[in-house]
């Protein structure tokens, strides 16, 4: 892609998110979301592969449906209450419609079906943008809406955590596994949103760091399924030793960074008297942990003398920058000791 066009599209992505962040009016927020969608579509379809074009069409249709629902709900709210302010959603009907529209935008279960299919059709770089940056603008709006729909948010959160764990169990494609991982993590964030928005933001930040390092590992190894991942030890042995730690951190295993947000969320849910919800969420984390363990096993415990179905990759020098991978990997593995400091910051 022409670097000038790429720069314009990335600028459009940033501008769309910033407009949504800065807006207090529903029309402006909707405009920012639309800019975001339109800016990422050429990035998705840039390789002209049938899979990529199909994924782009699916993404466009779901995002357009969500944006239309959001616009309809905000107009309905203005009609019922005379208010266009984002903070002034008081009527339950537009409030529920907007929550569901934003859930469709970020891919919360049961409105998640598009996300694994779309992510599977994209290259890893665009997939990384879709899994991280594209979640920011809708999340900012959900955070501003949060006091209104307590039961709906808990149902969405629990369903997402369970389906995100369940859906990834029989997958062999890494991008689909990461899509289900994204659904499960978003479910955890939505669960605690109404009780402690600050814990939700910490969870979002740690999810971004962990997903960034995972995508960069797969990109460095040029891995898209478990078989190619199993052969990566011939290409980058040191990275192969570290990758299980990154994957298990995504699964939320102590003493790694990914355990911190789960710990804080379960603590908060128990404080709020939602012990059954916390128990179900913790059990759903076991499902996710299983498929991360499966990836770790394929990567580190299936080397010779075991027979492998993948072919050995060429050990060509990589053109990818390794500083971002080194930084995010270190943060993914070792930030758990900072939990008391983060807890202290959250109480302010």
Image (cartoon, rainbow, N blue to C red):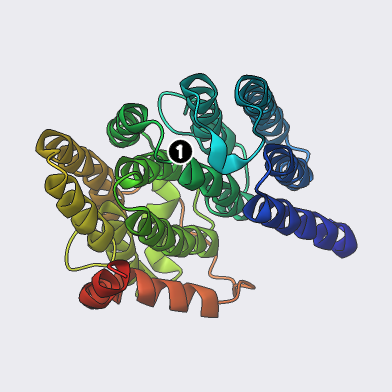
Q: Is residue 122 above or below residue 196?
A: above
Residue at the image position 59 percent from the left and 41 percent from the top: 86
Placement of 107 over or under 291, stated as above or below: above
x and y percent of residue 252 in the render? 24, 55
Find numbered disc 1 in the image and state the secondary structure of the residue it sits on.
Answer: helix
Label 1, residues with CA under 10 Å away: few <14, some 14-19, many ≥20: many
Image side of residue 130 versus residue 333, left or right:
right
- Mark yes or no: residue 94 visible: yes
Location of residue 250 in the rendering, given as x and y in whole percent from the top left corner: 32, 56
Residue found 46% across the figure and 38% down from its top: 176
In the depicted view, which residue is nearer to us: 132 or 127? Answer: 132
In the image, 79 versus 103, the foreground residue is 79
Quadrant location of the C terminus? bottom left
| Lateral position of residue 193 relative to residue 289, left or right | right
Q: Is residue 175 left or right of residue 252?
A: right
Instruction: Give the image location of residue 167, x and y in percent.
Output: 34, 30
User: Is residue 300 visible in this depiction of the protein?
Assistant: no
Q: Which is nearer the eye, 314 or 293?
A: 293
Identify the residue position indicated by label 1 in the image. 176
The residue depicted at 67 percent of the width and 30 percent of the height is: 67
Q: How many marks?
A: 1
Residue 275, quarter of the rendered image: top left
> Residue placed at 46% from the left, 22% from the top?
92
Residue 21 position, x and y percent, is 63, 54
Q: Looking at the image, is 269 positioned above or below residue 60?
A: below
């Amino acid at each position: 892609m022409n670097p000038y066009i790429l720069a314009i599209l990335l600028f459009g992505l940033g501008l769309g998110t910033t407009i949504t962040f800065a807006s207090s009016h529903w029309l402006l927020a909707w405009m920012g979301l639309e800019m975001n969608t339109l800016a990422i579509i050429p990035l998705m379809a840039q390789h002209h592969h049938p899979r990529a074009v199909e994924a782009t069409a699916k993404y466009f249709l779901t995002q357009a449906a969500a944006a239309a629902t959001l616009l309809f709900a905000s107009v309905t709210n203005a009609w019922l209450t005379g208010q266009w302010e984002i903070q002034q959603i008081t009527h339950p009907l537009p409030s529920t419609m907007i929550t569901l529209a934003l859930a469709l935008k970020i891919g919360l279960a049961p409105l998640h079906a598009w996300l694994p299919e779309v992510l599977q059709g994209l290259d890893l770089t665009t997939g990384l943008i879709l899994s991280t940056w594209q979640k920011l603008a809708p999340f900012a709006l959900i955070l501003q809406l949060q006091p209104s729909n307590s039961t709906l948010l808990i149902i969405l959160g629990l369903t997402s955590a369970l389906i995100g764990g369940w859906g990834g169990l029989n997958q062999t494609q890494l991008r689909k596994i990461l899509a289900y991982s994204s659904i499960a993590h978003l479910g955890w964030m939505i669960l605690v949103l109404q009780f402690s928005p600050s814990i939700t933001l910490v969870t979002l930040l740690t999810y971004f760091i962990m997903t960034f390092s995972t995508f960069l590992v797969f990109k460095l190894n040029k891995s898209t399924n478990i078989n190619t991942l199993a052969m990566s030890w011939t290409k980058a042995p040191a990275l192969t030793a570290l990758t299980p730690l990154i994957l298990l951190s995504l699964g939320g295993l102590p003493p790694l960074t990914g355990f911190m947000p789960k710990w804080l969320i379960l603590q908060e849910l128990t404080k709020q008297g939602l012990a059954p919800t916390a128990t179900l969420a913790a059990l759903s984390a076991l499902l996710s942990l299983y498929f991360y363990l499966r990836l770790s096993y394929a990567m580190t415990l299936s080397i010779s003398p075991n027979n492998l179905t993948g072919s050995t990759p060429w050990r060509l020098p990589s053109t990818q920058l390794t500083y971002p991978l080194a930084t995010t990997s270190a943060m993914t593995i070792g930030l758990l000791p900072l939990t008391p400091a983060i807890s202290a910051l959250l109480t302010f």
